[in-house]
Amino acid sequence: MNTVLDRLTDAMSAATGTVREEELRPLTMPERRRRLSPWAAPAAAAAAVVLVIGLAVSVSSGLFGAGRPGGAAHLPAAPHRYYLAIDLFTWKTSVRSTATGKVTAVVPVPSLFTAGPVSPALAAAGNGTFYVAAFERGVRGEQIYRFRVTAAGHVAEFARVPGGILRPGWAADALAASPDGSRVAVGAYYYPYHGRLPQRSDQVVVINTVTGAQSTWWGGSPARGYRFFRVASLSWAGESRELAVLGEWCKVNSIAGGEGCPLGERVAQLRAINPAGPGGRVLAGRLLLRQAPRTYLAQALISPDGSVITAMVLRGKIRGNPAISGMYPQLMSVERIATATGHTLGVLYRRDLGDTSSSSGPMSDPLTLIADAAGQGLILDGGICNLHCSNEFNGWLHNGTLVPLRPAGFAHRESAEAW
Amino acid sequence: MAPEAGWPDVAVLYRQHHADLVRLALLLVGDRGCAEDVVQDVFTRLCARGPVLQRDSALAYVRTAVVNGCRSVLRRRALARRAAISRAVPWRDTQDSAEQTAILAEDRREVLAALAGLPNRRREVLVLRFYLNLPVAEVAAMLGISQGSVKSATARGLDALARRLGEER
């Protein structure tokens, strides 16, 4: 990080050094206007636009209950009383009441901010057991921890996972625990600590929580030019015998924890790998689903019995600036797909994302679909959204609707969730 | 410039900070002409509006106005790109003088292009924190966001830069 910061400050200093005061244009004042300003009409139009946007935000806020953050009486009963979230404001991993958003416990992981990069990785293993990745001060490799959330929403049995430490320079970006808790899969990205390091793609690291043994999978290349591999989602099936990896292969470098890969330069496939194996290429795994033409397969989770894939798919036009995260087709749907045939069984939720670029309301994080250990309860996380935007979302799916997760406005604060 | 009587703050600000503000805008929009236009526009509005500045917070006010002006430029660019499907990248696709070309070597251009590719808030936070060396609280006040948001945008911005620069090598 210091190297990047050094390079950044050096570049900014050099760039601004080209600006010399004597070369700048002098300030020129416009003539005082005597008649109605020619900007009056555009200003009125702009005011109307502001009014419309204001109304849209109000409607959106109302839909998401932002006006009554404490009232949960009108919400349907959630499948889980508590959920976990990494809070970017406090840099803590907290247990929150699903109904009210109130924090019931804080997971005693080391500070997420001071010891390493932010690692948005949380996973549920069933029976109230969860996993989280975090850096400890003074330890170069990121550590995986296991803990239990009690029926009262408290944290118990917090401990390091045996062998659950990633190699230095690698950080967890996705996490999935097998239902029996015997293995944890980590989608790890390379985080350059020092010096100028060669470009690297994500890896899938499977940790045996009993023996501490690790095996590593890398992406491979599905076609010429698709060099950059990223793990979009991880899920387990077949009583822990298969790990489903949604891999994204991109022609261009996409940014970690930020913008995804543009549609035209991306291949996405859901592959099942054998987690007991010694490692190898994800592409060598069994093909479960591939991204169809003109669609953006953003997330794909397999059910525990392996029969159904729940996928988040984006279709339609792309709205927004492609240079600043405006790369997602605007029509999102969460669909259930038969693994055996690839046919769509039903649509759980639809949403128009609108403009996804940062100029008018961005989603600067990838879209995330989070399932509980049973593969039933689904959280839909639209990621972080900049100031004043109206297309952020963070909630759980219920009968075709998105029920907001409390507290209101939390979508721009959390970096990972689980339940 | 010949400042009118009664508005001494604007004149003083202009004399003392004009170039610095252009530098700030340059880092945010990646184009010198636009940067000068943004700062020019801010001072023009200040002069037209009258004595709105308070002496102790005048610089912060003007800096905020420049940041907002840069956002407007980027928004207009976004609209233009949407229409033209342009893929021009600031700092990479600009026509510079020989001197600028010499100063801004390829490595620095890569860093600046990566900075320009960040979402607005992250770019603004990195520039305000590490170019102007402003404390977190001041950046938060300028951008109208919480200190936690400044910290998270800083961490995520540096993280994104690190990954992009590391992988492009």
Image (cartoon, rainbow, N blue to C red):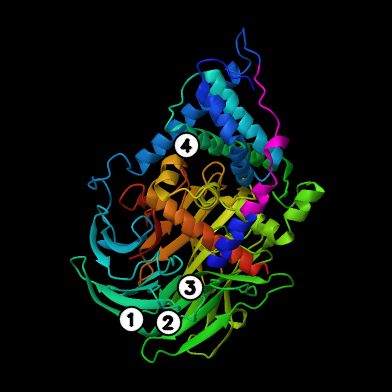
Do the residues bearing badges 4 and 3 touch, measured as CB atoms within 8 Å? no
The residues bearing labels 3 and 2 have C-alpha atoms spaced at a distance of: 10 Å
Q: Mark 2 falls within which chain?
A: A
Examine the rendered structure and indicate whether residue A330 appears above or below residue A144: above
Q: Which residue is mark 2?
A: A165
Give the residue at mark 1: A160
Q: Secondary structure at mark 1?
A: strand
Q: Nearer the viewer, residue A220 or A371?
A: A220
Q: Earlier in the sequence, mark 3 or mark 1?
A: 1
Three-letter amino acid code at the position of disc 2: Ile
Q: Are marks 2 and 1 in contact (CB under 8 Å)?
A: yes
- Foreground: disc 4 or disc 2: 4
Q: Which residue is mark 4?
A: B60
Residue placed at 58% from the left, 30% from the top? B14
Residue type marked 4: Ala
- Secondary structure beneath disc 3? strand
- Which residue type carries mark 3? Ala
- Name the residue located 61 percent from the left edge and 13 percent from the top edge: A37
The answer to the question of whether label 3 and label 1 lie on touching residues, with beta carbons closer than 8 A, is no
Is A392 located above or below residue A271 in the figure? above
For label 1, count other residues whose C-alpha is less than 10 Å away and answer few (under 14), some (14-19) or many (20+).
Answer: some
